[in-house]
Amino acid sequence: FLEDSPDYCRRNESLGAPGTLGRECRRGSGGADGAGADDSCERLCTACGLRVLERRVRVTSPCNCSFTWCCRVSCQQCASVHSKFRCGRPEAAGRAPGKKRLRARQQHQQQQQRGRNRKPNAASQAVANKTS
């Protein structure tokens, strides 16, 4: 009773505490006044100095199911988008991981494509003929 509690915000392998960085959490909708919201993200992330990061995920699941006599269920596949929340570093807010690298790769591919589509001018054609 006289020892301080460990910091559960930080990873502590000796205690088996994973910390809160990267942990998924649940954002509550609450009522119109926000009362009763089950917002584990506030407790889990911001209490530990982390930000709540949102990721949109497309989920496909069975829907509009019907029972056919005897013993068969037929369903359609419906897609919906769900939000997933996790605790992340404050500097990562508003930015998906790897987005900068993806943008650079796309720009590089566009430049390569433009180079392939470019018609050779007379000077470059003359150089190509000399080297052949």
Image (spheres, rainbow, N blue to C red):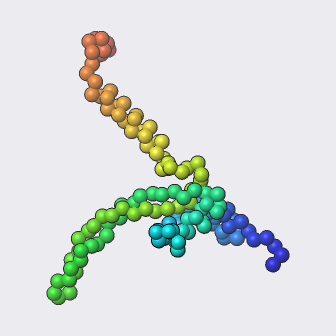
Give x and y (percent) for residue 27: 50, 66
Q: Is residue 86 left or right of residue 5?
A: left
Residue positioned most to the left: 69
Q: Quadrant of residue 22?
A: bottom right
User: In screen coordinates, is 65 left or right of 35?
Assistant: left
Residue 91, horizontal then vertical, whole percent = 58, 48
Decide: is 42 above or below 105: below
Looking at the picture, does residue 122 appear above or below residue 8? above
Total count of labels: 0
Q: Quadrant of the C terminus?
A: top left
Q: What residue is drawn where x is 17% and y is 83%? A: 68
Q: Residue furthest front?
A: 33
Q: Quadrant of the N terminus?
A: bottom right
Q: Would residue 91 be seen by someone viewing this image from the given angle?
A: yes
Left or right of 21, for residue 2: right
Q: In the image, what residue occupies the spot 51% across and 68% down?
A: 34
Q: Residue at x 16, y 87 (%)?
A: 69
* Outermost right residue: 2
